[in-house]
């Protein structure tokens, strides 16, 4: 089952939606605007799929389904193929059912690597070629991270690239109101130490640095896991993060405990609006409202790219509210890690046309069409930054392009009973102060041990 964060990362899906892109309905006229039209012309010259058709299914419905259709239309126009995209809010269940029934679509769009890995092990996914892996390494920022994310062990135990990452969400963000920072004389922190110093300065000034809310119904606790994941990337090597995700090191390893304790540093008295108990019970959708009160109830809020959905009506990102990268330490060699989520295209029924569509996704244009309409970020280094509809969107994408390491949300990679269960609930107990980091981590590891 998709996590609450996966569902919120795009347009909320409430019903089954389907639509077929039409080559006659191009969103932007070819040759006009700052798009990389040359990449489409080059692709057209190498691919002719006239009379062929493919089906694609994924998690996007509503407005997002319209946006992916607007991208597909250019593939149809260039190749003569016909493509039908269908989106569902129960994609995860649907794709398992269809593969079990030998009725899988040609391509499926996976929001969770864990489900994709399961189907790879069952032999339901076609591996991509090594040239595509090399292309991702060379063309995507932090390219090796993306190759690793989409590489899985097949039925024979051998590892291959099985998917193409596309449409990425960034979680390593802090939101703030520029006017408040300016009036108080606060500057955007450049390093993690600067962020902690700013937090201390705000508390000394008598204002509350942070708004935090873990409430999310049955999914209460997940925002705390995002904090811990970002802390892991700022206190340990990426390889340690990977070992943690796979439980190759236990959840109560000292490095994980240290990351939980780093989150705890931000929960000190005077640092969080309402205190620790309020942080654990405030709904995550309501938490950022403290930024917009007068006087403000807090000055900073850590949340992913989807959080503006829950800002007050009429709030303009880039004017009324801004954001900055959750900074990394200046010392050491951890670089600029970025935590996030995203989707991956995988071939579920092999054909030349399906493989051709993966090739189409390599073109800058396949990213630019959606990005120009808002809602898509991409690590593709060759897209024209002028296509973004606002400076804010361009700046968000720059965070991806400047990343030295990208890691997918850890709790979405862990077994469901851990990542969407014990990790959530135990972090609530830690946030309230009911238990320390050691107790929290050990309780999660005990639950993991019970799955063996």
Image (tube, rainbow, N blue to C red):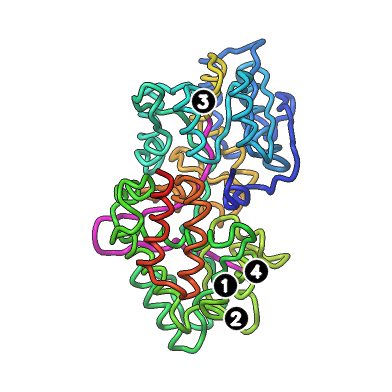
In the image, which is nearer the foreground, mark 2 or mark 4? 4
In the image, which is nearer the foreground, mark 4 or mark 3? 4
- Marks 1/2 in contact by CB < 8 Å: the verdict is yes
Q: Report the span colored magenta.
A: 321-345
In the image, which is nearer the foreground, mark 4 or mark 1? 4
Which disc, if any, is residue 177?
1
Residue placed farthest to the left in the image?
Answer: 332
Q: Position of residue 67 (x, y in %)?
A: 67, 38
Q: Earlier in the sequence, mark 3 or mark 1?
A: 1
At 45% from the left edge and 53% from the top edge, which residue is drawn?
399
Label count reads 4
Q: Which residue is mark 2?
A: 296
Callout 2: few (<14), some (14-19), or many (20+) C-alpha neighbours within 10 Å?
some
Residues at marks 4 and 3, CA–CA distance in whole angstroms? 40 Å
In the image, which is nearer the foreground, mark 3 or mark 1? 3
Q: Which residue is mark 4?
A: 286
Q: Earlier in the sequence, mark 2 or mark 4?
A: 4
Q: Which quarter of the rendered picture does the C terminus lie within? A: top left
The residue tagged with tag 4: helix, strand or loop?
A: loop
Horizontally, residue 345 falls left or right of residue 52, namely left
The residue tagged with tag 2: helix, strand or loop?
A: loop
Horizontally, residue 22 falls left or right of residue 208, namely right
Question: Residue 416 in magenta?
Answer: no
Residues at marks 3 and 1, CA–CA distance in whole angstroms? 40 Å
Which disc, if any, is residue 358?
3
Confirm whether residue 177 shows in the render.
Answer: yes
Residues at marks 2 and 4, CA–CA distance in whole angstroms? 14 Å
Residues at marks 1 and 2, CA–CA distance in whole angstroms? 9 Å
Q: Position of residue 305 (x, y in %)?
A: 56, 55
């Amino acid at each position: 089952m998709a996590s609450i964060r996966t569902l919120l990362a795009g347009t909320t899906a409430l019903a089954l939606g389907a639509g077929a892109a039409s080559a006659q309905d191009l969103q932007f006229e070819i040759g006009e605007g700052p798009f990389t039209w040359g990449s489409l012309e080059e692709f057209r010259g190498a691919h002719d799929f006239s009379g062929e058709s493919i089906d694609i299914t994924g998690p996007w419905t509503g407005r997002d389904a319209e946006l992916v259709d607007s991208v597909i239309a250019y593939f149809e126009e260039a190749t003569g193929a016909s493509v039908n995209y269908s989106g569902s809010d129960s994609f995860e269940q649907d794709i398992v059912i269809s593969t079990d029934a030998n009725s899988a679509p040609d391509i499926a769009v996976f929001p969770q690597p864990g489900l994709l890995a399961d189907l790879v092990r069952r032999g339901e996914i076609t591996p991509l070629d090594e040239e595509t892996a090399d292309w991702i390494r060379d063309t995507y920022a932090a390219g090796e991270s993306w190759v690793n994310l989409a590489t899985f062990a097949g039925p024979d135990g051998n590892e291959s690239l099985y998917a193409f990452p596309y449409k990425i969400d960034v979680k390593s963000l802090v939101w703030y109101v520029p006017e408040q920072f300016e009036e108080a004389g606060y500057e955007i922190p450049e390093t993690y130490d600067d962020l902690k110093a700013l937090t201390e300065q705000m508390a000394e000034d008598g204002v509350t640095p942070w708004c935090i809310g873990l409430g999310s119904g049955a999914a209460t606790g997940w925002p705390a896991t995002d904090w811990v994941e970002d802390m892991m990337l700022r206190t340990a090597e990426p390889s340690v993060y990977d070992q943690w995700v796979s439980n190759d090191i236990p959840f109560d390893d000292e490095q994980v405990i240290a990351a939980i304790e780093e989150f705890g540093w931000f929960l000190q008295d005077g640092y969080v609006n309402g205190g620790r108990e309020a942080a654990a019970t405030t709904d995550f959708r309501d938490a950022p409202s403290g930024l917009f009160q007068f006087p403000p109830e807090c000055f900073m809020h850590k949340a992913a790219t989807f959080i503006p959905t829950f800002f007050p009506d009429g709030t303009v990102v880039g004017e009324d509210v801004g954001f900055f990268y959750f900074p990394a330490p200046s010392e050491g060699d951890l670089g600029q890690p970025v935590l996030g989520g995203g989707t991956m295209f995988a071939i579920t029924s092999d054909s030349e046309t399906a493989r051709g569509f993966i090739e189409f996704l390599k073109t800058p244009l396949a990213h630019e069409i959606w990005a120009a309409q808002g809602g898509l970020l991409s690590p593709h280094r060759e897209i024209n930054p002028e296509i973004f509809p606002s400076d804010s969107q361009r700046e968000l994408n720059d965070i991806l392009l400047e990343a030295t390491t990208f890691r997918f949300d850890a709790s979405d990679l862990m077994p469901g009973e851990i990542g969407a269960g014990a990790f959530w609930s135990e972090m609530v107990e830690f946030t309230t102060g009911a238990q320390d980091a050691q107790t929290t981590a050990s309780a999660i590891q005990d639950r993991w041990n019970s799955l063996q």
